Image (cartoon, rainbow, N blue to C red):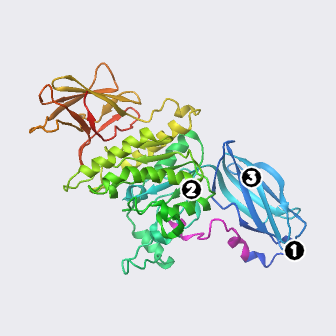
Amino acid sequence: MNRLLIGRRPARALEVLLLLGLAMLPATAQLRLIRGAADYQVYQRGVSNAADIPLYGDAHGNDGKQVEARILRMNPSREERGWTTLGTVTGSRWTGVLAAVPTGGPYAIEIRVAGAEPLVRATNVLVGDLWVLAGQSNMEGVGDLRDLEPGDPRVNSFDMTDTWAPAEEPLHFLAYALDRVHWRSGRNPNQPERLPASMLEEALRNRTKGAGLGLPFANELVKLTGVPIGLLPCAHGGTSMDQWDPAKKEMVGDSLYGSMLRRVQAAGGKVAGVLWYQGESDAGDSAAPLYEEKFRRFIAAVRSDFGQPDLPFYYAQIGLHINPAGHDGWDVVQEAERTLELEIPHVGMVATVDAVLDDRIHASVESLKTIGQRFARLACHQQFPDVAACQGIERGPRPARAERIAPRVIRLECETVNGKLTAAGKMWGFTVVSPGAQQQPEVFKVVRDPANPSALLVHFQEAPVGAQLQLYYSKGRYSYANIVDEADMALPAFGPMPVQ
């Protein structure tokens, strides 16, 4: 927690550390890094599995001299690349690129005027993959701050003040964010204020909620692949698709979408992918029918504005909500999320309907860990086909076909199952509907098909033989559902699915 109280400076301005001693240096030794590497910064690797690191600064009194840099590997310490020329000082300015820095680290980067002692040093620099965390509360993180897993040393975070730091919970801290769209004020909601630094320590000390899925995702993915990860927390609880409207990007830090876009640019401009968990605020009966098209346009806008037309975009299907006030809109949003995965390339969905809740809508710490690990397996499956640990991982069970094989039995066939379908305890979560019937069939047993480990047999009270049936899984806002595969990837909510 205390890292939020230390080193509060713009991530691109190591000069703040240098200015105190700069006045005492001889003119021939003055050197500043204005833009470039920062402690704990993660650079997005390219297709060559390396990153080019642009650097820019000034060196007063050194016109015509060369500026050099070298890369040291840390833990254990050794020289990765010796002194190489970045550029020549012209009009007191210099610029250059550290080309093809290999994926991995941590590295230390040292910069000097040729022949002088190093004056700039950035440490714990990593080259790997950047991931955006966006959406509403279950992505922001509202889990209890207990039983937390520590961050892997290969996972860093571009926190909400635009400062790179080791990743630790809570990743999101809205009240101290750089962009005012995230600020909150109980005194005057129309004039939100950033939490003053004088109140920060007390706020952190008293905070009991804030654990999310981003850190478990990164820990699991780096364990599977060995590729370092930088997280960009951008989520904000309680927000709707309209509040994430891409048309508001020109508002920059006054809009959620604009803030996200600005932070991506500040972190280097390219990312490996986006993790998204949102939809609860759009699941009302009037808003839900509009969700599919809004979400489709949102994904397209993100890819266009990031300049990455095939950007991986992974999202959570909304889970459970204990609310007696209707449920039709909830089913509509869940089904829209399920079917968009089948239509849009380079997207993937993680099911959450089996999550344990801490309250009426928020997943518990343990369930957030599970969901984060599911995101990691999905990314592993889709983006790392050559990594041994990722080979053989499927995206998880997806409903493919429902067939009535007896008067009181429906067989549901699933695809992309890891091993076999299973559950902790009795399999449950299905609803059989006969549209127009006065009395609906009641499910009394669900078992795995002995002839097919990727299929289930749903037994229900007898309905007319010729009746048209529909099958749902996790119908409504709160329906107990517990079916997963052997990789702990859950069956998503679906329905209505026509029964053949």
Task: Give the residue furthest to the top.
Answer: 451
The reply to whether the magenta stretch includes residue 12 is yes
First reached walking from the N terminus: tag 1 or tag 3 = 1
The reply to whether the magenta stretch includes residue 365 is no
Amino acid at pointer 2: Asp
Q: Which residue is mark 3?
A: 72
Front-lying residue, 283 or 187: 283
The residue lying at 52 percent from left, 43 percent from top is 221
Tell me residue 51's x, y (percent): 69, 49
Q: How much space separates mark 3 and mark 2, taking CA atoms?
A: 35 Å
The residue lying at 37 percent from left, 47 percent from top is 317
Q: How much space separates mark 1 and mark 3, taking CA atoms?
A: 28 Å
Q: Which residue is mark 1?
A: 61
The residue lying at 18 percent from left, 55 percent from top is 324
- Looking at the rendered image, the disc whose residue lies closer to the viewer, 1 or 3, is 1
Q: Which residues are magenta?
A: 1-19
Mark 3: secondary structure: strand
Front-lying residue, 417 or 152: 417
Q: Which residue is mark 2?
A: 305
